Amino acid sequence: MRPRHPEIAPRLLSETDEQRQLRAVLRDLFGETSSPEDVRKYLAAPRGYDEALWVRLAGEIGVHGLAVPEEYGGSGFTFAELGVALEEAGRALCCAPLLPTVALAAHALLYSGDRAACERYLPRIADGALTATVAGFGDGEPGVTAERGSAGWVLRGRADFVLDGAGADLILVRAATPAGPRLLACEPDPGTCRRTPRRVLDETRRQALVEFRGAPATPVGAAEGAEDAVSATLDTGRAALAAEQVGGSGHALDATVEFVAQRHQFGRPIGSFQAVKHRLADVLVALEAARSASAYATACVAVAREQLPVAAGAAAVVCSETFRLATAEYVQLHGGIGFTWEHPAHLYVRRARGAEVLFGTADRHRARLAALTGLTLEPCSV
């Protein structure tokens, strides 16, 4: 059983000067390039995001390589710096596939311990030349099988609702083999891999059905370490998503506070009414809790991975519920305009609803946390 109170140095939960500078640079950049109007415009683009911004994030700021070791072409920082970038991306509702490429696929490669695969793919991820994602990383038996063909391994089967599945250049697949699940890398080709975009609630985060029809693939890492790598990748994804949710919640609160200070009823700002103050105070308290949970999960990814399952599960619950609350008040306290398609609030509501089930529901996270911490659930007696 893991310790219930893992030791993390308090300084690791506080923002450094470098991280504050990174946040300021990214907030300015996203303010210029990722307004709600920009988001709507690029939703109709072939890849669903601003590809020029993707190049700038990689080349000018080095976001893609923040948590990638220098030996693989990255900057050699930690997940804490990447967490800052993800939070700002979530605040601006950036549509670029940072979550699947930089948080999931890149860390799946690192966790696999396969130096050859890391040397082949991570430098291209770090410089923005390669987008990537993962497939079949859910619970239960994989929907994809891997078998040895005359020219090597091939994949057959399907994985649904794959993040950026229709456009990613590389897919890391958890596939079933006679010896058990293992991780394989596939560079999809239309002849052997059919990718069908799915219609989803949150259009800012594209997903797809990926069908493998004898697609060539290369094993990544050892077979016996595949499940541990997948589990660690999913927890890293939960920590990354929590950072995004904190950013989105922060935007929702700030935008609502600004609105209620300007909107007048009965000769005074509606923000001066006690009922409105109480509702916004509730969001602020929830947001501070979410920031703490996210910072703790981020620190665990960076320096205490053995504690990550608990930290990531807690962050997933707290940050999802905070984002739901913040976006609900974003709509409600904007009154009639908040319900319209023209207002950006609905984009954040959709992101919040989609994100809260992306890596499992809050109830599933709570059940997992209970198991990880040794808690038992007693049946209720009436």
Image (cartoon, rainbow, N blue to C red):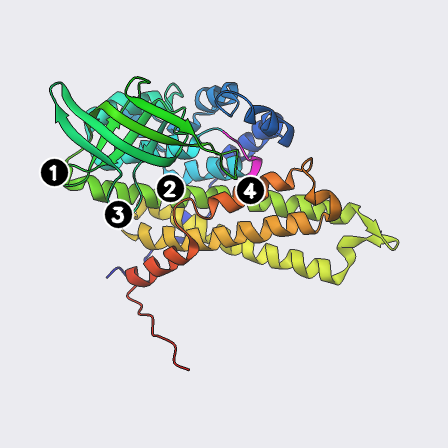
Front of the two marks 4 and 3: 3
The residue tagged 2 is 237
Q: Amino acid at mark 2?
A: Gly
Q: Which residue is mark 1?
A: 178
Amino acid type at mark 1? Pro
Above-or-below relation of 43 to 23: above
Q: Is residue 101 above or below residue 368?
A: above
User: Is the residue marked by circle 2 packed among few (<14), some (14-19), or many (20+) residues within 10 Å?
Assistant: many
Tell me the kind of residue under disc 3.
Answer: Gly
Q: Where in the figure is residue 195, as x and y percent of width and height?
A: 37, 26
Q: Which mark is residue 140?
A: 3
Chief SS of the magenta region? loop
Amino acid on which the number 4 mark rests in the picture: Arg
Residue 343 shows which numbered tag? none
Magenta run includes residue 218: no
Residue 203 in picture, x, y percent from top left: 52, 34
Q: Quadrant of residue 121?
A: top left
Alpha carbons under labels 2 and 3: distance apart: 18 Å
Secondary element at image label 4: helix
Q: Earlier in the sequence, mark 4 or mark 1?
A: 1
Task: For label 4, count other residues whose C-alpha is less than 10 Å away and answer few (under 14), some (14-19) or many (20+).
Answer: some
Q: Which sits earlier in the primary sequence, circle 2 or circle 1? A: 1
Per the model, the C-alpha gap separating discs 1 and 3 is 16 Å
Kindly identify which residue carries mark 4: 350
Task: Report helix, strand or loop for mark 2.
Answer: helix
Q: Earlier in the sequence, mark 2 or mark 4?
A: 2
- CB within 8 Å, label 2 to label 4: no
Quarter holding the C terminus?
Answer: bottom left
- What residue range appears in magenta? 91-95
Q: Rate crowding at label 1 as few (under 14), some (14 to 19) or many (20 or more) other CA atoms within 10 Å.
A: few
